[in-house]
Amino acid sequence: MRTIPYRLDQVGGTVEVSPEGVVLRDITASHESAKFTLSGSGSVGQGTSWDLKLAGQNVDTDAALHRALPTALTDLMDALKLKGKLGIKLDRFVYRPPAAGGSAGVAASNGAEPEIDLRGAVTLDGANLDVGVPIDAVKGALNFDAAVRQGRLRSLTGSLDLASMRMADRTVSDFKAALVKPADRPELLINGMEGSLAGGDLAGQASLSFPDEGPSRYVLSLVVRNADVKDLAGETDQNLAGRLTASLALEGAWGKPDARRGRGDVVVTGKDMYRIPVVLGLLQITNLSLPISSPFSSGIARYSVEGQKVTFEKIELRSDNMVMSGDGKLDFATKQVRMNFVTDNPGGFQVPFVRDLWRGAQHELLRIQVHGTVQDPKVETRSMGTLWTTVDEVLKGDAPEEKKTPRKHHSTTE
């Protein structure tokens, strides 16, 4: 058996050696702040193997642990970007040295890998990982049964049972999922995801691939039902009340936001709502701000994601006495926005800087265009009948006294 490259101090316990093999009893050891216990038995000579039980507390996912573990397990940890302190409990740890070349020593020198079977659990207490979006403050357990062959994770089945975690600054509780790694495929399937989010239900599935070459990838399908809008969107307005249902299908590569592709939709109902929360990643929420100063009672948004760009194919807002519909694009890389809205009653939704100009046109179809940067948007309005005005100067503030010019109203025929 090759020496494990993991420094252990304060080693104690009993080792019994006999012609039948070796028995380890109550072995204890430490590695910095981590504590380990080990017991089991092994045979020596021809057909060497070890059948062990191992437990560890406060184990850091550092470089030393990576060097000690089989490459297959470190690849999986790297694919998940797992960081933090772990608890490890292996009820079964079967180790069979390489058999190629006649002896374990010759096999090891030829680069052959041992066979390892594992069954147990990893507990997480505040650990971090990444499945397409950062996840932190993870508390719970990963139960698994795995086999390593020829240095690769051949198969894995297990389950996630997490009391709580934070996904993109949103708390998810009572999260459960089933894990399956198909034999001889560099892919981990996360099926039957369910949990509680903002007072609503979260469900979905995902697959994570970690090929030998190229970046790790993810494919995600997610549904959020009946979530509290104020909680989900991070709003502080005490008058805001509403429920949200949303779905998202997304795929991409870790560390490559330009490779992200997907589609989603959002339906919200409530009162005193000014913005629509849009789910762009696994609970990666952005609030779609709209050019209105009066709330809506229901809204729909349907969109597609391509890299850093979001295309809103349909946006529809309703209040008691009007409907406002539109579409547009938002580029998170450049912070550029371009959106178009149409309403048949500009008095129903008060449009900042525009309502005073449109008191005489409240029964005409009004088109609102928003473009520029998110930090400095520009709003243009156009009556589909008789009137056109640009309000950039209002957004920018009045010009100096000597440069003031009358606001222009242009007649058009359309």
Image: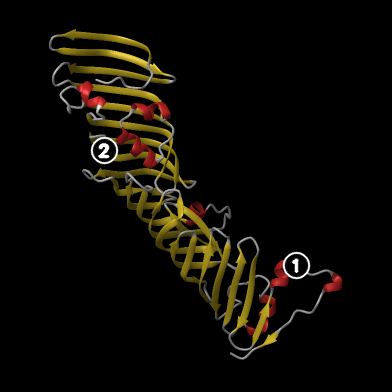
Up-down: is 185 above or below 230? above
| In this picture, residue 34 sits left or right of residue 323 | left
Q: Say which element carries label 2.
A: strand
Q: Quadrant of residue 397?
A: bottom right
| Residue at x 55% of width, y 81% of height | 344
Up-down: is 178 above or below 106? below
Q: Which residue is mark 1?
A: 397
| Residue at x 45% of width, y 68% of height | 300
Q: CA distance from mark 1 to mark 2?
A: 63 Å
* Residue farthest toward the right in the current orientation of the protein: 402
The image position of residue 312, as x and y in percent, is 47, 68
Q: Amino acid at mark 1?
A: Gly
| In this picture, residue 193 sits left or right of residue 46 | right
* Residue farthest toward the bottom in the current orientation of the protein: 413
Up-down: is 146 above or below 369? above
The image position of residue 132, as x and y in percent, is 41, 49
Q: Residues within 10 Å of mark 2 (few under 14, many from 20)?
A: many
The quadrant of the rendering that contains the N terminus is: top left
Per the rendering, the mark at residue 225 is none
Q: Amino acid at mark 2?
A: Leu
The image position of residue 122, as x and y in percent, is 33, 32
Q: Residues within 10 Å of mark 1 (few under 14, many from 20)?
A: few
| Residue at x 24% of width, y 28% of height | 110
Up-down: is 74 above or below 360? above
The image position of residue 46, as x and y in percent, is 13, 19
The quadrant of the rendering that contains the C terminus is: bottom right
| Residue at x 37% of width, y 48% of height | 214
Q: Say which element carries label 1.
A: loop
Q: Nearer the viewer, mark 1 or mark 2?
A: 2
| In this picture, residue 289 sits left or right of residue 124 | right
Q: Which residue is mark 2?
A: 153
Q: Quadrant of residue 356?
A: bottom right
